[in-house]
Amino acid sequence: QVQLVESGGGLVQPGGSLRLSCAASGFTLSNYAVSWYRQAPGKERELVAGITSAGGRSNTANSVKGRFTISRDNAKNTVYLQMNSLKPEDTAVYYCKAIETTIVRTTYWGQGTQVTVSS
């Protein structure tokens, strides 16, 4: 079965940390660039971070720069989002998206994981 599964979300206090995982099954994630998105209630989905298929380049949104880090372990078919110094405004459902690095550009989305930052 081809799927992306996010995990690692939860409730954390402001200033705390979480590490999200995006695990692929049924396909080889190393052939895909991967991005993390988030969507807060009543807001549009926004891009948080992205990483190339081999992991050589990555970027993060200005709103999380210096606090969030994206990385990948292709041997484990998994991409991570390390989130530090969390703020209440980081509260959202976090999704990962994988885009194949070929002309076909097959795309997969995960089902999302809830992150809630609150005291």
Image (spheres, rainbow, N blue to C red):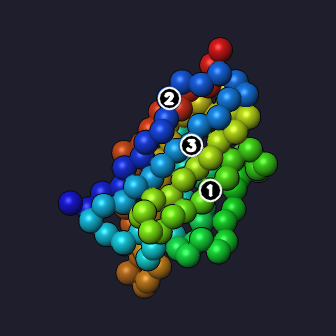
Q: Secondary structure at mark 2?
A: strand
| Residue 84 occupies quadrant | top right
Which label sits on residue 116? Answer: none
Q: Of the residues under marks 2 and 3, which one precedes in the sequence?
A: 2
**Residue displayed at 62% across by 50% down:** 48
Q: Secondary structure at mark 1?
A: strand
- Side of 25 where 14 appears, left or right: right
Q: Position of residue 22 (x, y in %)?
A: 45, 53
Question: Would you say residue 52 is visible in this rendering?
Answer: yes
The Cα atoms of the two marked residues, 2 and 1, are separated by 18 Å
In the displayed orientation, state which residue is furthest to the top: 119
Q: Secondary structure at mark 3?
A: strand
Q: Position of residue 83 (x, y in %)?
A: 65, 42
Q: Mark 3 highlights which residue?
A: 19
| Crowd tier of the residue under label 2, counting other residues whose Cα lies within 10 Å: few below 14, some 14–19, many 20 or above | some
| Crowd tier of the residue under label 1, counting other residues whose Cα lies within 10 Å: few below 14, some 14–19, many 20 or above | many
| Crowd tier of the residue under label 3, counting other residues whose Cα lies within 10 Å: few below 14, some 14–19, many 20 or above | some
Q: Amino acid at mark 1?
A: Ile
Which label sits on residue 70? Answer: 1
Q: Of the residues under marks 2 and 1, which one precedes in the sequence?
A: 2
Q: Amino acid at mark 2?
A: Gly
Q: Position of residue 89 (x, y in %)?
A: 67, 30
Q: Of the residues under marks 3 and 1, which one precedes in the sequence?
A: 3
Pick the quarter of the image with the N terminus. bottom left
Question: Would you say residue 87 is visible in this rendering?
Answer: no
Q: Mark 2 highlights which residue?
A: 10
- Side of 84 where 11 appears, left or right: left
| Residue 90 occupies quadrant | top right
Pick the quarter of the image with the C terminus. top right
The Cα atoms of the two marked residues, 2 and 3, are separated by 10 Å
Q: Amino acid at mark 3?
A: Arg
